[in-house]
Amino acid sequence: MDALKPKLKVVGLDPGQEMIAKGELELGLMNASEVRSFVKFAGPVPAPLQDHTNYEAALTAKASPEGRHEPCSRQSANSAARWKEARMEPQATHP
């Protein structure tokens, strides 16, 4: 690890991606869903090194009937496709 320290930089998400795009950095680690279109997504880190961020959704009582179900729906093929398109993995539902 000591050999890597001189090569490591901690920068913000957008500045880091801009540095990658300019060739100032070779690699960045970030949430896959946060990768901007001007950098190349190389792929996820290996499974043993993965750390997941869980998101929750809350809806108001005034939400439309469609809105009450759709943001949290992970079971429909259409909804699952949108989650994956955003490089997010829908969590398995629990009964």
Image (tube, grey):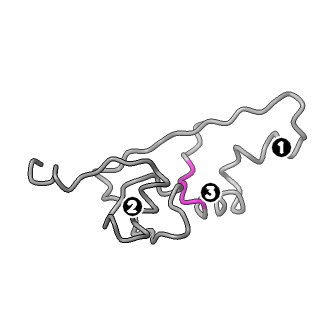
Q: Is 34 in the magenta?
A: no
| Residue under the point 31% across and 67% down | 26
| Image point (32%, 55%), residue name | 47
Give the amino acid type for the residue marked by disc 3 in the picture: Trp
67 horizontally vs 26: left or right = right
Q: Residue tagged by mark 3? A: 83
Task: Give the residue drawn at x 36%, y 71%.
Answer: 23
Secondary structure, mark 2, is loop
Q: Which mark is residue 67?
A: 1
> Which of the 4 image quarters holds residue 80?
bottom right
Q: Which residue is mark 2?
A: 44
**Residue type, numbered disc 2:** Pro
Amino acid type, residue under disc 1 in the picture: Gly
The mark nearer the N terminus, 3 or 2, is: 2
User: Which labelled disc corresponds to residue 2?
Assistant: none
Between the residue at mark 3 and the residue at mark 2, the CA separation in whole angstroms equals 16 Å
* Count of numbered badges drawn on the protein: 3
Q: Which residues are magenta?
A: 86-90
Quadrant of the image occupied by residue 15: bottom left
